[in-house]
Amino acid sequence: MADSSPQMPRAGVDYPKTFGQFQEWFSTDEACLEYLAGLRWPGGFACPKCGGRDYWRTGAGLWMCKVCSRRTSVTAGTIFDRTRTPLRTWFAAVWFVTSQKNGVSALGLQRVLGLNSYETAWAWMHKLRRAMVRPEREMLSGLVEVDESFIGGVHRGLPGVGPDKISVLIAAEHLDRNRIGRIRLEPGPSDRRLALVKFGQRVVAPDPPSAPTGRGSCGDSPTSATSTSTSPSWARTSPRT
Ligand SMILES: [Zn+2]
């Protein structure tokens, strides 16, 4: 390794800023494994069975505990688990998907990575997108409009919901009258009864218990609202209890 190379990146701290840096850091699968190991064990390896800190590397991304001989895969439980594709190709996909300001298409991913099939590129893209959603992300709060819309199934002269229209559930925070904050989207279920209510319960934080304020009305304070109509109704559905 040339002296001009930067130190090995600290996993979870250092992220490549340019494509050149990315290529330099992650030129081999071993470099990718080391980076993943740093993410998995920020304080150094710790055996999940006995807590042992000493290990042997046994190939194929396995760390073997010197105390109890348990072998732990550094990619277990990640989107890279049991992949037959070189990790550096996966890392390149991550770079591509996360560095495109205006989003990426499966076709773009296929071209950049030289993947054989569009289907593979599409599956990768969706795997990465799912992984990019923080599982512990906060729920929406404040004044939230929950509504349903339909896409697809264009029929002239046929108003209403056609059989081939797809329902999409939408929840949007209202920051003020003209601006929305965070949003959540979800495909609607085939059984639409109570779907909006259940969706709202999943993505909108319940109001905190109201404390007595000594004032007669709190009608102007932001609070969660659920609308089941198809027209904007956030203003009038603000509870005034
Ligand atoms: Zn152990």
Image (cartoon, grey):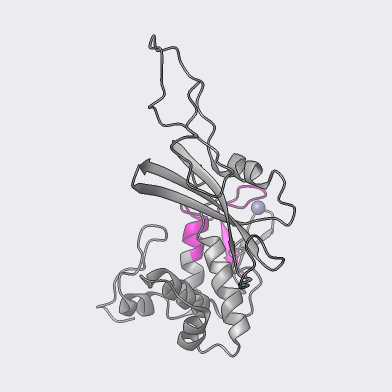
Farthest residue to the top: give it. Answer: 214
* Residue 55 placement: quadrant: bottom right
Q: Nearer the viewer, residue 10 or 227?
A: 227
Farthest residue to the left: give it. Answer: 4
Residue 140 in sight here: no
* Magenta stretch encompasses residue 142: no
Tell me if 216 is positioned left or right of 164 in this view.
left
Q: Position of residue 229 (x, y in %)?
A: 57, 45
Residue at 46 percent across and 15 percent down: it is 211
Residue at 51 percent across and 62 percent down: it is 37
Residue span colored magenta: 36-57
Q: Nearer the viewer, residue 52 or 186?
A: 186
Q: Position of residue 136 (x, y in %)?
A: 53, 46
Residue at 37 percent across and 75 percent down: it is 22
Q: Position of residue 53 (x, y in %)?
A: 55, 52
Tell me if 92 is positioned left or right of 73 in this view.
left
The prevailing secondary structure element of the residues shown in magenta is loop
Q: Nearer the viewer, residue 118 or 224?
A: 224
- Compared to residue 20, the image places residue 51 above or below, namely above
- Compared to residue 53, the image places residue 76 above or below, namely below
**Which quadrant of the rendered structure holds the N terminus?**
bottom left
- Compared to residue 36, the image places residue 46 above or below, namely above
Q: Nearer the viewer, residue 237 or 66?
A: 237
Residue 180 in sight here: yes
Tell me if 9 is positioned left or right of 201 in this view.
left
* Magenta stretch encompasses residue 45: yes
Residue at 75 percent across and 52 percent down: it is 191
Q: Position of residue 208 (x, y in %)?
A: 50, 25
Total marks drawn?
0
